[in-house]
Each structure stands twice: as C-alpha cells, then as structure tokens.
Image: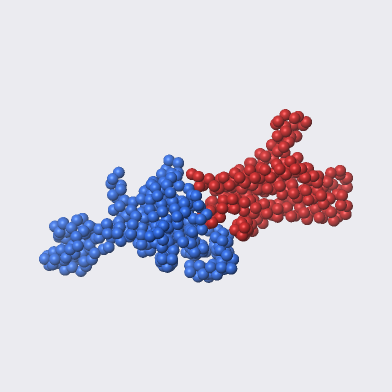
Amino acid sequence: MSVFRALVRRELSAFFQGPTGFIIIAAVLFLIGLGFVVVLSGLNGQATPIPVTQVFYSTYFFWLILLLIAPIITMRSFAMERASGTYESLMTAPVGDWQVVLSKFAGALIFYAILWVPLLVCSVVVRFYVGESAVLGLGPMVTSALGILLVGCLYMSMGCFASALTRNQAVAAVSGFAMGAALFFTGFFSYFAGDRSDWISQLARHVSLANHMESFSRGVIDLGAVIFFLSLTALFLYLTHKVVESRRWK
Amino acid sequence: MDTPMIEVQNLTKRYGQHVALDGVSFSVGCGEVVGFLGPNGAGKSTTMRILTTFMAATSGSVRVGGDCVFENPMRVRERIGYMPENNPLPTDLRAGDYLKFRAQLKRLANGDSANRIAEVMEQCGVADVAGRFIGQLSRGYRQRVGLADALLAKPELIVLDEPTAGLDPNQVRSVRRLIRELAGSHTVLISSHILSEIEMTCDRVVILHEGRLLASGALDALMAKANAAVVAEVRASLTDTIEWAAKLALGQAECAEQPGGYVRCRFADAKSADTREKIFASANEHGWSLRELSRQAPSLEDLFVSLTRGKDGGK
C-alpha cells in the first residue's frame, strides 16, 4: 500500500513541480469563472424551475473543460515516462503492472478533482447571496459532484489508455481527445432519436453523457449511469493494463 | 558452486524480422563481476532488459537466483538493482527525494530507508547535491544518482548498462572504484563497448556480437588465446629493419621510424616464449643498439578484433 501511495504522490508532484499543473488550473479556473458569470447573468432577475447545477451543465463550459482538459491531464502519465526512459526503471522496480496503472489513474483523478474545487466555491457564493436553500440544495450539489467525479473516472481512464499507447505526449493528448469527443458526440444522436425505440436510438440514449449528467444535476443518482461510467472506466483501465503488460508479450 | 546468480539459456529475441539475440547462453556465479562486451547493437541492452524483467524473450530461458524472469518477475526485481542505458531520471525531482521515492518503491522500511539513503549517497558521492533538482545536475552527478538508486536496496545482483558512458576520466575512475568495491558482496553485470573499462573492473567477460555469443569465460583464459605482441626499438635504417624483421620470421611485423634514428618494430603474433631472446640476440649480431624490448599483454581489444574477424571471415 505504501508503494501505491508513493506512486500516487509522485504522479501528483509531477503536476506541481513544473508549470503544467498550474497552467491547467488557471485555464480551468478561467472557464469555470466564465461559465459562472454566464449562468448568473442568465439567471439574473428570472425565475427558473430547474436547479442551478443543471443550468451549469446545460452551458457548454462544463463540457469544454471536460473534453479539452481531460486529455491534457492524462497525456503525460505514460507517454512522458516512455519518452524520458524512466519507464524502464519504474517497470523494473518491484512494482506490479496494476499498481502502476491504478496509481497513474488515481493521480490524474485526484488532480482532476482539485480542478473542480473552484466550482464548489462558486456554489457557496450563490448559496450565500441567494439565502434560499431551495435554489441550490445540498442534494443536487452532492450528486452533481458525484457526476463530475464519475465522468472524470471515465475520461481519466480513457486518457491513461491513450497515453499508454504512445511515447509522444502530443499524440496521447490528441488521441485521448478524439476518443473523448467521439463518445461525447455519439450521445448527441439521442436528440435526433426522439421517441424512437430502435436499437441505435436506445444505444445513443444510453451513451449520452449529457443525459447522464442531467439526472445527476437534478439530484438523482441514476444507477444505470453509475454503472455505465464505472464499467467503462474499468474497461479502459483493463485495456491500459493490457498495453502495459504487452511489452512482456513480444 | 551452488545455483548461479544468472543463468541464460538459448536466449533469442526477435523484433519483427530483426533478430536481436540469437541463442545466447551464459551463466554468472554469485559474487562475480562480469563484463558484458560488444559493439553498439550487439544485443547487450536487450539482454539486460530481459534479465531485469522489462521485456520478454522470444524464446529461451533466463533465471536470476533460480527464479525464472518470466514466471516470477517480482522475485527477480527484488533481487536486482538496475541502471538502464543512458540512466534515465526524472528531472523534476530533487536527488534526495528521488532516492526516497525509489526506496519506497523498493519497500525499504521507513526507519531504515533514511539511513540507507544517506549511506548510498555517501558511497556514491552525491550527498552534497541531495537538495538539488536532478535536471540541474551534471552528467557525472546524475550517473552517480543512478548508481545510488541501483545500490539502494542492497540487491544481490547489480546490473549496470554502460555505467561510464559520457563521463570524464576522473568520474570514470571514481565509478570504476565504486564497482570494484561492490565486488565480493554483490554480483555485478556491467555492459560496455569500452574494452579497457571491462578489463579493469571485471573478472569475467561475456562477449556478444550481432546477437550471438562470441566468447565467455575468465578474462585470463580468454587473454591467453590472444597473442601477445612484442615491441622492439632498434637504431637502424627503416629498410634494414624491415628486412631484418622478415628474416626473423616471427610473424607479421609493423615497422615505423621514430625520432632519433630509431625504428620501432611491432611483432603482432609473438607466440613462442623465446621471441624476445631471439630479437635481442639478432639485434646484437647486427650491432644495433636496442633501446626498448617489451612484451605487450594482449588487450581485450586485440582479443575482440581477432574474435570478430574470425566470425566475419567464416561468413
């Protein structure tokens, strides 16, 4: 366990030893702030029947952050170690492949979670000034946070997989972005599907991240969505592990 | 001798069509310092990567301390301290923090690890740069940080891939001294394409060429196969000397003029023991003054050249 902790700490320290982590945080802070202002000005003086958390996800800021920032967080995880050669000393230390994969994933996920802390501050500000708990109930806030974390699990595992495939960080970022965007936009088919019940429409509804996030932001924990996120995360971690293991196949 | 530290049998590694290693077999006993010698691309690093469980072999078996590297990689890793080629290190960590991180990976107990880290830093001479970022360290210091990492867990087997590459002569000497100190208490496998390097630090050599084992054995025994050269410097004209050397019939001789009217004559294959007596007597007969007559122990280079030449000639 202490080995795992050491590996995670190393992952996190890599973000903060250089400017990378701070640049990502600054960019996300800017986007969150911008989103917050847009939401506030939209709400200003108008009554809205839906929770504020839901309004935030219906703006494109949330998805912009997720799609753009996630591959940047994960791009260095394996690719950089491969490029610099430290991968070799890491993988010849008495450390298991799973430990390495999970620690990289955990490090990225923790950093991702840190990115969203400003959003929490924004919510507190809204709550403080509105003074009405119904506007921003604790329930939707907690489930929204859970939703953000679950989407993060999926995108971090996907990014780790993309990074494990290459030694070039740019390639890792672009392929991670492509996978993430493909999954996100596949969900858009559910808008065109309407009420149709053919298998493509059902599939589109099932993989629609926006739909899943909507239920979380309403304060609902949709078990189907939880299983969807966790199972895909597990799948990508498994694939990452296979890639890591594959150096010992050839 | 009980189980050897390293036992490699029929090791073959292919990258697609390219054959990197072709049926290599050798073994290394406990406590030996073995040099792994070959030109670039001979398969040294590939062998070391397979040995340290980083890669799998296409076929053949490799055992470290009796454990198969493929079936029991964790047991093998715990036994090995490895410094990969070019000594890759994370540049964003301080030297001391890096060693602390490595100590955690290698499961050194917390209380011992601080002492042990201080010990290896002292041993490798990096104690004074413990607080500096690795990215800012000179090549020599980095190399020694890599060495300190390899020694950290007191491994039974230390594998160093070109430990002295890119170091200046003073640093080379200190690394060499360090390796010498390790002999006896550890088994050490060092790769190098610098022949004098191996000659000075190793008891035994394993020579690879184009993925094949060229020779393996005690250094002295291999050396005995290579012929010693004899050098004589006589005061005579070049043409006379060449004629004289041919008449002596001591094998191939190279003559070159030296300042001061001397000619330096090198007899490459001085097989018989009385070569020098013969040369001395003959020079005396001619009435030439002789200012040098020496036997040059065969360098590993001579050995290597003759071995590879033999192989190429056989093709």
Q: Which picture quadrant has residue B240?
A: bottom left
Q: Is residue B312 left or right of residue B158?
A: left
User: In the rendering, at what x and y percent does residue B163 appear?
Assistant: 44, 60
Q: Which chain is red?
A: A
**Where does the image place residue B175, in percent across and percent down from the top left?**
43, 65
Q: Report the residue at 38% width, 60% height from top.
A: B1
Whole-percent x and y of residue A165? 56, 45
Q: Residue at x 33, y 53 (%)?
A: B215
| Residue lying at 42% horizontally and 68% vertically, measured from the top left | B181
**Residue drawn at the location 23% of the way across and 66% of the way down:** B294
Within the image, what quadrant is residue B302 found in?
bottom left
Left or right of residue B229, residue A32 in this image? right
Q: What colour do you see for chain B?
A: blue
Residue B130 in sight: no
Query: In this orientation, which residue lies closer to the viewer: A235 or B265?
Result: A235
Q: Nearer the viewer, residue B100 or A17?
A: B100
